[in-house]
Image (tube, rainbow, N blue to C red):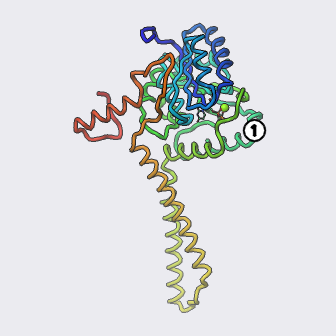
């Protein structure tokens, strides 16, 4: 199998308990991609599903060997599952999309057209869909607005992980060793000529959304702390402001004393100022703690996913986990200082 020429297009789909979606997704993809006339593969990354996702995949692979699968050892989360799939893709262009049919396969020919016209990244932007639920729409809009302000990189609301990446861009992305992986923003960060295509989001075909409010908040917080130092800088601004106020208060107190109209100040004002300042202090201690936590996680350099088994695909030689670790070990054994960035050998 490995001696075959790699396909032109790889479609990568992370799937967590999506047994009811894969067969129809495969059928739709096959229809669209065969019409485009390029060779293709579908790589499903089974993110530790508890349902029959892997069974469905094995069956699909027996019917159509272009369907391939990577099964992770447990649930590692959407971004890690997506990365696992991307790491196993061999196409000249890679399209990532969700398993639940919210990302319409009919858009794929348009993505490929843009790619042929020279865009190395083709984003898709969801036009607002009233069926999506008011809560999800507003929270996601709000998040992207805050995120874009905090992090110098603009991620449009409605830009999800439905996009095409050229092999060149993908290879660059696979070299990023970070754990707090937020591909939406990283794809902006790397640059390269890009295009964007609007689309209308469909409703989920089968099953429930895998993003509970708790998961969404965690996702948002990881994204902010991996991409932005602004929360830390806010601490400095708040510190300067509060010490400015404190300085004015001292001037006032001394002035009042010297001028002789010094009165015993009420304990209520002292108490409220003290508790206000302590409040700010603890908030920023918490924020600093979060960043230290992120550093701890990053420094450990644990693999971001573990593969339990594969079907129709092999460990890619460029599996980011192995490659990055090998290089680090090499660097250390050569006695070179560890650097933030590492260069080509
Ligand atoms: N997913 C995953 N692992 C997770 C959560 C989600 O692989 O821990 C997959 C899921 O199967 C789907 C995609 O990521 O293919 C997007 O998830 P979902 O549709 O639940 O998110 P939503 O569209 O509601 O934001
Ligand atoms: Mg979905």
**Where is 253 relative to 16, above or below?**
below
Look at the image and tell me in which quarter the C terminus lies: top left
Give x and y (percent) for residue 195.
Answer: 57, 25
Of 222 and 306, which appears nearest the observer?
A: 306
Q: Which residue is mark 1?
A: 133
Of 52 and 279, which appears nearest the observer?
A: 52
> Would residue 175 appear left or right of 163 to someone viewing this image?
left
Give x and y (percent) for residue 244.
Answer: 50, 69
Image quadrant where residue 15 sits: top right
Q: Answer yes or no: is residue 198 visible.
A: no
| Count of numbered marks | 1
Image quadrant where residue 270 sits: bottom right
**Where is 163 relative to 293, above or below?**
above
> Would residue 145 appear left or right of 241 to someone viewing this image?
right
Of 161 and 228, which appears nearest the observer?
A: 161
Point out the residue furthest to the left here.
Answer: 335
> Would residue 7 appear left or right of 24 to someone viewing this image?
left
Q: Answer yes or no: is residue 46 visible.
A: yes
Point out the residue furthest to the right here.
Answer: 130
The answer to whether mark 1 is within 8 Å of ligand 1 is no
Give x and y (percent) for residue 79.
Answer: 54, 34
Of 279 and 248, which appears nearest the observer?
A: 279
Q: Residues within 10 Å of mark 1 (few under 14, many from 20)?
A: few
| Residue at 64% across, 39% down | 211
Q: Quick check: which quadrant has ligand 2? A: top right
Task: Name the element at disc 1.
Answer: loop
Give x and y (percent) for residue 322.
Answer: 38, 29
| Residue at 39% across, 21% down | 317
| Residue at 62% across, 80% down | 268
């Amino acid at each position: 199998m490995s001696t075959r020429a790699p396909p032109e297009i790889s479609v990568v789909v992370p799937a967590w308990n999506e047994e009811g979606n894969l067969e129809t997704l495969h059928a739709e993809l096959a229809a669209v991609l065969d019409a485009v006339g390029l060779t293709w593969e579908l790589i499903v990354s089974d993110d530790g599903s508890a349902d029959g996702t892997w069974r469905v995949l094995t069956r699909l692979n027996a019917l159509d060997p272009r369907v391939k699968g990577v099964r992770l050892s447990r649930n590692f989360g959407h971004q890690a599952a997506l990365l696992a799939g991307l790491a196993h893709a061999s196409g000249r262009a890679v399209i990532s999309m969700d398993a639940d049919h919210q990302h319409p396969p009919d858009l794929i020919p348009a993505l490929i057209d843009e790619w042929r016209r020279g865009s190395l990244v083709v984003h898709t932007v969801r036009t607002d869909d009233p069926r999506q639920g008011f809560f999800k729409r507003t929270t996601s809009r709000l998040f992207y607005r805050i995120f874009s302000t905090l992090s110098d990189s603009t991620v449009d609301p409605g830009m999800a992980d439905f996009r095409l990446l050229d092999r060149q861009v993908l290879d660059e992305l696979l070299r990023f060793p970070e754990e707090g992986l937020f591909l939406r923003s990283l794809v902006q960060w790397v640059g390269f000529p890009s295009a964007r295509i609007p689309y209308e989001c469909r409703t989920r075909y089968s099953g429930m959304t895998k993003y509970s409010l708790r998961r969404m908040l965690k996702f948002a917080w990881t994204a902010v702390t991996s991409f932005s130092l602004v929360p830390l800088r806010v601490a400095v601004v708040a510190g300067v402001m509060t010490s400015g106020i404190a300085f004015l208060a001292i001037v006032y107190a001394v002035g009042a004393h010297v001028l002789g109209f010094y009165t015993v100040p009420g304990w209520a004002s002292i108490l409220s100022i003290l508790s206000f300042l302590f409040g700010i202090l603890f908030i920023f201690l918490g924020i600093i703690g979060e960043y230290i936590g992120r550093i701890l996680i990053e420094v450990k350099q644990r693999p971001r996913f573990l593969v339990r088994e594969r079907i129709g695909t092999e460990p890619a030689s460029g599996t980011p986990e192995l490659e990055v670790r090998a290089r680090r070990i090499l660097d250390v054994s050569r006695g070179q200082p560890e650097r933030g960035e590492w260069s080509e050998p």
